[in-house]
Amino acid sequence: MSILLNLGFSKSLLESTLYVKIDGADILIISLYVDDLFVTGNNLSLVEKFKKEMMVVFEMTDLGLMMFFLGMEIKQGGVFVCQKKYAKEILKKFKLEECKEMNTPMNQKERLYKEDGTEKIDQAYFRSMIGCLLYLSVTRPDILNVVSILSRFMHCASEMHLKAAKRVIRYVKGTCNFGIKYKKTEKFKLIGFSGSEWGGSIDDMRSTSG
């Protein structure tokens, strides 16, 4: 968007909808999606100034703090992001609204692979299910691992793969309120974890973590 570049913003090389402007210790971050524009920064006066500049150029309405975007619900006070409404839509779409809830998203002892001896299923139906779960995992890192594993079988899905995918949805039913919370802290310590499993994939004997 040329108007943002003219105002001193730089376009992200990795995310085409993201623009950033840094002025000394101040930063403004802009995200564009079709006709929606989101702005945030560490200096409220600069945020307000930017909004006024944009309203001179475009016919715009200031909707205040962001509360809902692309299926994601945002609650302020810290920042809590969840997809409760979208999770319930998944349950409805796959007719699992009355299913029994599960405590975990995956059976720890179950190993999934391509030729498991069970019948193949409707591949389009399975791809739709995994696609929904992949989008849900944007705010649900607790299901990301199992959904990533299931996505390997989108073109050769079997009854066993479908059963595992439905287990994830049954887990989601009891955890619709789960999400990610970001909060301000004076002391920040980044902690990383990696679980290595050499030869974890039965089909090609590749490592899960590389």
Image (spheres, rainbow, N blue to C red):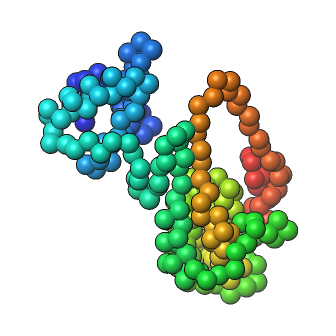
Residue drawn at (33%, 22%) of the image: 45
Residue closer to the observer: 166 or 180: 180
Residue 111's image quarter? bottom right
Decide if residue 2 is in sight here.
no
Residue drawn at (49%, 43%) of the image: 76
x then y, percent, for residue 53 = 20, 28
Residue drawn at (83%, 52%) of the image: 197
Residue 177 left/right relative to 1: right
Task: Tell me: residue 163, above or below residue 16.
Answer: below
Decide if residue 179 is in sight here.
yes
Residue drawn at (40%, 33%) of the image: 40
Please, which residue is most extreme toward the bottom here? 119
x then y, percent, for residue 7 = 25, 23
Task: Tell me: residue 83, above or below residue 40.
Answer: below
Residue 4 left/right relative to 145: left
Please, which residue is most extreme toward the front here? 77
x then y, percent, for residue 37 = 30, 42
x then y, percent, for residue 20 = 38, 28
